[in-house]
Image (spheres, rainbow, N blue to C red):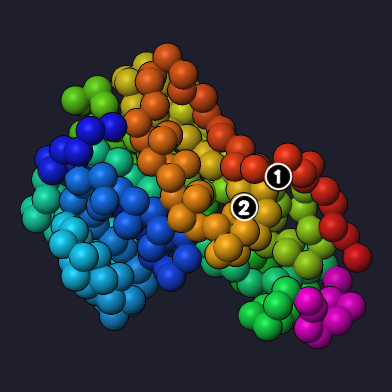
């Protein structure tokens, strides 16, 4: 895709890893990027980093699972930078849990970051996870779909994972959410394809770690390529799997 300063890409779900890498890649390609995080501090920090490199970026605070919040955010994005050409949904509430039994360990080997809930997830916790991880994607898609369909162009790219295909016992809620997100995105592909709008899921087959084949900057280039892809080659789901490893059940 050639540089085009009129292009506007929104990334919902900004963190120091993949979200930031995607934002940087699209900004480096000449896009104006709008970055959405749950806190304005995180969003502005990310946007400021891009602006300091001479790139066009703005940060916004918003809750992806709240329709009113997203309406305000998308209205502000459109007022500043015009219609959104590409939407990347990169939101996930990532909390280890089991569905009906207690975890066999209070802390598992997910590096130093993750601790299980210990007890099984409650129905309210489970529904809240789906509201954020799946409902948020639909809320955001609804914000851009009408305009994309009217002008017959645009991409909605959603971050998925192999938990949708091979659930892990200690990630019960997240596995269910990724499976529902996969179904949602594939349904959007079928619904929007006749309007020349590309809804696509990126299924990432392992943990994102800098300096590995799953480096966030490498994955971000994959998102860029999908947004630029010839419509004749569009599919609903793309596997980011440079190692060729099969998804496996990692039950304890």
Q: Which residues are magenta?
A: 101-109
Q: Is residue 150 left or right of residue 103?
A: left
Identify the disc placed on residue 243. Answer: 1
Question: Considering the numbered disc 1 on the image, is that residue within a helix, a strand or a loop?
Answer: loop
Quadrant, the N terminus: top left
Residue 158, position in %: x, y? 47, 45
Q: Quadrant of residue 38?
A: bottom left
Q: Is 20 situated left or right of 244 in this image? A: left
Q: Main secondary structure of the magenta part?
A: loop
Q: Residue at x 64, y 80 (%)?
A: 113
Quadrant for residue 242, please give it: top right
**Image position, residue 132 (x, y; %):** 49, 61
Which residue corresponds to the image point at 85% horizontal and 58% vertical from the top-left? 250
* Nearer the observer, 151 or 176: 151
Whether residue 131 is visible to the viewer of this picture, yes or no, is: no
Left or right? Give the position of 39 relative to 157. Answer: left
Relative to 66, residue 230 above or below = above
Could you classify mark 1 by the number of other residues whose Cα lies within 10 Å: few (under 14), some (14-19), or many (20 or more)?
few
Locate residue 194, reporting x and y percent: 37, 16
User: Residue 148's spot in the image, x, y percent?
Assistant: 25, 31
Q: Does the magenta run of residues contain 105?
A: yes
Q: Which residue is mark 2?
A: 213
Q: Residue at x 91, y 65 (%)?
A: 252
Q: Is residue 29 above or below residue 147?
A: below
């Amino acid at each position: 895709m050639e540089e085009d300063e009129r292009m506007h890409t929104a990334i919902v779900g900004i963190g120091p890893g993949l979200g930031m890498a995607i934002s940087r890649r699209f900004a480096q390609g000449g896009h104006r990027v709008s970055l959405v995080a749950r806190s304005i501090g995180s969003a502005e920090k990310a946007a400021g980093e891009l602006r300091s490199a001479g790139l066009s970026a703005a940060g916004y605070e918003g809750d992806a699972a709240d329709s009113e919040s997203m309406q305000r955010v998308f209205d502000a994005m459109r007022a500043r930078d015009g219609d959104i050409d590409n939407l990347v949904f990169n939101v996930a509430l990532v909390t280890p849990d089991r569905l009906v039994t207690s975890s066999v360990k209070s802390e598992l080997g997910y590096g130093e970051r993750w601790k299980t809930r210990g007890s099984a997830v409650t129905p309210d916790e489970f529904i809240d996870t789906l509201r954020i991880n799946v409902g948020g994607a639909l809320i955001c898609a609804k914000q851009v779909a009408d305009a994309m369909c009217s002008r017959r162009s645009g991409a909605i790219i959603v971050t998925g994972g192999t938990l949708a295909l091979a659930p892990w016992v200690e990630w019960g809620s997240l596995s269910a959410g990724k499976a529902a997100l996969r179904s949602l995105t594939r349904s959007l592909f079928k619904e929007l394809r006749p309007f020349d709008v590309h809804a696509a899921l990126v299924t990432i087959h392992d943990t994102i770690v800098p300096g590995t084949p799953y480096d966030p900057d490498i994955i971000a280039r994959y998102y860029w390529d999908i947004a630029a892809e010839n419509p004749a080659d569009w599919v609903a789901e793309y596997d980011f799997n440079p190692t060729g490893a099969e998804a496996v059940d990692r039950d304890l």
